[in-house]
Image (cartoon, helix red, strand yellow):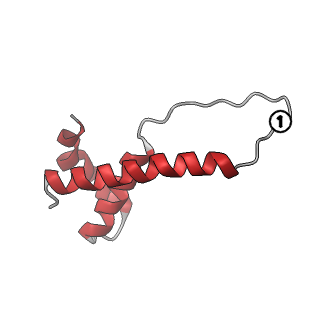
Amino acid sequence: MLTVNEVTEIFYLSDDFSKEFDITIKKHVLQENNGKKHRNKPNRLSDSEVMTILTAFHLRGMRNLKAFYPFYVCKHMRDYSN
């Protein structure tokens, strides 16, 4: 099992990467200006949280994400959010 400190370190590294990536990608992305409105519905998990979960999944060596999420993330990582 990953410790709280390890998960926190992974999250902070992912968050720093995500912030830098967002800045860089906005400089290179083509803007679509066809007059249509697009919905920007907020996600429940941030990009950093998703990257942290995927990194933990690979570090744990489990076979599938479908089993990893309810049996590890929902049970052990839920307390890490605060």
Q: Nearer the viewer, residue 27 or 6?
A: 27
Left or right: 63 in relation to 8: right
Q: Residue at x 45, y 49 (%)?
A: 18
Is 23 situated above or below 71? above
Place of residue 32 in the rendered image (x, y in percent of width and height, measured from the top left) = 79, 40
Q: Residues within 10 Å of mark 1 (few under 14, many from 20)?
A: few
Residue 56's place in the image compared with 70, above or below, is: below
**Quick check: 74 left or right of 16?**
left
Kindly identify which residue carries mark 1: 33
Q: Quadrant of the C terminus?
A: top left
Q: How many marks?
A: 1
The residue under label 1 is which amino acid type? Asn
State the image coordinates of residue 61 (x, y, percent, origin top left): 27, 72
**Residue 65 location (% of width, % of height):** 37, 61
Q: Secondary structure at mark 1?
A: loop
The quadrant in which residue 1 appears is bottom left
- Image-based side of 47 in relation to 70, left or right: right
For image coordinates 15% across by 53% down, the residue present is 5
Residue at image point 33% right, 54% down: 13
